[in-house]
Image (tube, rainbow, N blue to C red):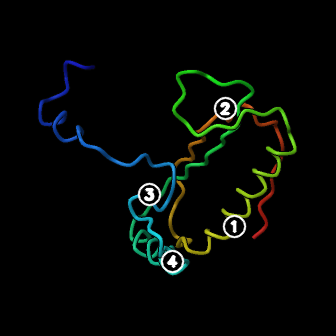
Amino acid sequence: MIENITFEEIEKYSIFAPRYTSYPTIPEWNLNFNHQDIEEIFEKDNVNENFSLYIHIPFCKTLCFYCACNTIITRNKNRIDNYVNYIIKEIKLLSKYIDNKRKLKQIHFGGGSPSYLEKKTIIFNS
């Protein structure tokens, strides 16, 4: 409830912060960012026991005028399927940097309309 929020909490969270729609987050990007930087970031993060996964699905059938997300208006299902296949490839590539003792605690689908995806069975081969 709003009446339970303290002034200290408002002050603590009233800062500009990156939107966590990419990892590493945008403040860590620079023109010299490379594969070794990704390895180092994941290595530092492996001290945490749990992790979350955000998957950006930018596709929508129509544009919502209030939306601030990076979206692609399309009805081309091939375009969406290709995107999902690249997401699967990226997960496979990056999974080698995540300590296998860590637990995936939550997955968040965001961006456009993740519900726009068709129901399919995806099998990840190790």
Query: Residue 111: image x %, image y %?
Result: 59, 38
Residue at disc 2, secondary structure: loop
Q: Nearer the viewer, mark 2 or mark 3?
A: 3
| Quarter in which the N terminus is drawn | top left
Q: Would you name the residue on which mark 2 appears? A: 113
Residue at disc 1, secondary structure: helix
Residue at disc 3, secondary structure: helix
Measured in 3D between alpha carbons, the distance from the residue under mark 4 to the one under mark 3, in whole angstroms, is 16 Å
First in sequence: mark 3 vs mark 1: 3
Identify which residue is drawn at 48% across, 57% down.
Answer: 51
Q: Quadrant of residue 27?
A: bottom left
Sort mark 4 into few (<14), some (14-19) or many (20+) by Cα contacts within 10 Å: some
| Quarter in which the C terminus is drawn | bottom right
Sort mark 1 into few (<14), some (14-19) or many (20+) by Cα contacts within 10 Å: some
Type of the residue with mark 1: Lys
Q: Would you name the residue on which mark 1 appears? A: 92
Judge from the rendering whether residue 33 lies leftward or rightward of residue 93; answer left or right.
left
Type of the residue with mark 4: Glu
Q: Would you name the residue on which mark 4 appears? A: 39
Residue at disc 4, secondary structure: helix
